[in-house]
Image (spheres, coloured by chain):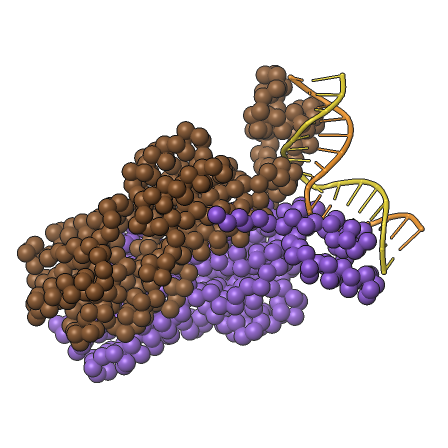
Chain colours: A purple, B brown, C yellow, D orange
Amino acid sequence: MDKNNFSRIRIKDIARLAGVSAGTVDRVLHNRGEVSEKTRNKILSIIRKSDYHPDILASTLAARKPCRIAALIPRATDDSPFWKYPLAGIEEGLREIMYFGVSLERYYFDYSDRESFLQSAAGMINEKPQGIIMAPVFTEEASLLLKDFNRKGIPVVLINANICSGSCIAFVGQDSLQSGMVAARLMHYGLGDDADLLIINFTRERGNQGHIQKREEGFRKYYRENSKNNNSLLQQINIAEVGISREEKILEQVILSSRPGLRGIFVTNSRVFRVAGILEKNRINDIILIGYDLLQNNKDFLRKGTIDFLISQKPREQGYKSIMTLYHHLVLRKQVERSHYLPIDIITKENLEHYTFT
Amino acid sequence: MDKNNFSRIRIKDIARLAGVSAGTVDRVLHNRGEVSEKTRNKILSIIRKSDYHPDILASTLAARKPCRIAALIPRATDDSPFWKYPLAGIEEGLREIMYFGVSLERYYFDYSDRESFLQSAAGMINEKPQGIIMAPVFTEEASLLLKDFNRKGIPVVLINANICSGSCIAFVGQDSLQSGMVAARLMHYGLGDDADLLIINFTRERGNQGHIQKREEGFRKYYRENSKNNNSLLQQINIAEVGISREEKILEQVILSSRPGLRGIFVTNSRVFRVAGILEKNRINDIILIGYDLLQNNKDFLRKGTIDFLISQKPREQGYKSIMTLYHHLVLRKQVERSHYLPIDIITKENLEHYTFT
DNA sequence: CTGAAAGCGCTTACAG
DNA sequence: CTGAAAGCGCTTACAG
């Protein structure tokens, strides 16, 4: 039987050992100067010997300075509900740490509106938060912001997409290239070599499409490395989001004209339900369909078998980890890991129901 | 922009409003009597109106009563390292809540020694922990213990296997039946109908084999419901763990004699690396092999491609959730969910590396 | 540069 | 049945 006791030595004890007052110990503990080198060193050496751990409860209680964290993320919409999950994760984390005086300010922007991103960011900066969670949807603008935050000494955690070049404390998200490889692996495992495949990209305004491209790249990489499938069998199509009915037509035409050879479709984002709809409408059920994200639409098609596999980005856990990382940094003052690559979850009809928190 | 402020009304405020002292408010807050009905009701009504939330930091700081949690789990061994992961998860959780005075006492037992389970349990009971995490490896004995803890009012969280019939506050683990279905789905997706399959059970001393059986059941259920594969194609073999070399011989014989028809093998626990070894030795690479748990051996074979899929039980997260559930119950005094079925993770060579915390 | 005192919000004997 | 006081371990003005 082992025991795991926690801090017993108190500031008071150290003060007594050093022959000084608690206030002085506190001053060296927090490096706020106004202590002579001599006493400072004496206290420091005592601390080192004594494996002192501050009582963080007493500390935050006494300091009673609130810690305001801001989240700059896209607003979830009916059309694109993805971002409600990271937010839910952030809020779940918040509930666990609010006792430490942590509060959350939410700043939303429109996923496809660069201007709204900048405006929301400006509002956030005005409030001078102690820490920031940011979804860097618009790469260039986000990079500039990052530099600004860095200059101001505000720690930032990036969520979902990674543009962190030294100026953020951590990134939380998925390894996109690798997730494309996972999709390819599933495709290849089910179809073997020499099956006609189609990759569909639903693109949007230029901006954060980097990780979408990476997924396609990963998919191709897998096939290059593991299959005798020659590239001509691997078509790709980009669908600009220009209005659903027009898109549907184009897609339908491409798919139908590729039959009967076409055996598998990989959709590089959460819009896979669109393709599923087309397959269903045309009563096509001999095509393997793989895409991303556990949206309600997608889950329905997965249950019906129209979609074969979904890859989850663990959006909720992304949110949870983001705020917890900031908490570890700001409140606990612990070293945090720079990269948090979350698992690439493979979801089927059979394991779907147990991915409630994802 | 939203704000998320937390408790501002203090006991002192309520006391003032009720025209009593803080001590009296505290007494009704904690139901420890010695208050007249009249003042009690007055205070209660004020509390209800005021959305008072206790400051849990101040509360645990002032109460300074330690909360000792005990974990009764199998000792991890070289042969069977599985249990080191739940323990790691428990310890990870502990680090986050030790500030609240939570400490952990570990009680180990031998996974295949019923007697050691009882002895370790006795030692634990002696120390009168405030909460218990228990792996109910030996079903009958564990049931009796559960009743005893229940009588003593000690809350228990069961981990990994579920025998909780009302006398535990929560279960954390995997849905075994469903995980078998996931394995079958992967098998069937890769091989189609009418492939010869083999299910291998490595059994041990009678005891907690319930969830292993469930896995086989799930596997068969999937095939019954989804395939035209008739049952004669689905052989099953139980290997009693009687010594590795004898087992290897038997297994090798079974596998070789089933060739060339045999196309897939499902191993119902983490011993899948044993089967992988036999396949490798005999240069067999046209058999799909699926098993459980990210042990080092298994991961190596997954990387080499001898094992095609592993299903993870998320052992670390089981541990983490167990202790956090107890913490929510004991320290935060919150209602906790009864069942925590963790996701059934599908691991391939391609997504293995991002399942570090699992 | 240093110490003594008051206070964070809650709990706990103790006195009445 | 109730209140006043001391204390949990730390922080923060303030006085010197």
The residue nearer to you, when weighing A353 against A11, is: A11
Position of A305 with respect to B326 (left or right) is left
The residue nearer to you, when weighing B229 against B356, is: B356
The residue nearer to you, when weighing B270 against A192, is: B270
The residue nearer to you, when weighing B300 against A182, is: B300
Residue drawn 16% across and 74% down?
B282
Tally of numbered tags: 0
Image location of residue A89, percent across then percent down: 46, 53
Residue drawn 67% across and 27% down?
B23
Can I make out residue B47 in this image? yes
Q: Is residue A242 above or below residue A131?
A: below
Residue drawn 13% across and 56% down?
B236
Position of B356 with respect to B243 (left or right) is right
**Where, by quadrant of the figure, is residue B115 drawn?**
top left
Q: Quadrant of the C terminus of chain B?
A: bottom left
Position of B3 with respect to A228 (left or right) is right
Residue drawn 31% across and 67% down?
B297
Can I make out residue A267 in this image? no
Image location of residue A51, percent across then percent down: 65, 57
Image location of residue B170, percent across then percent down: 38, 40
Image location of residue B240, percent across then percent down: 20, 54
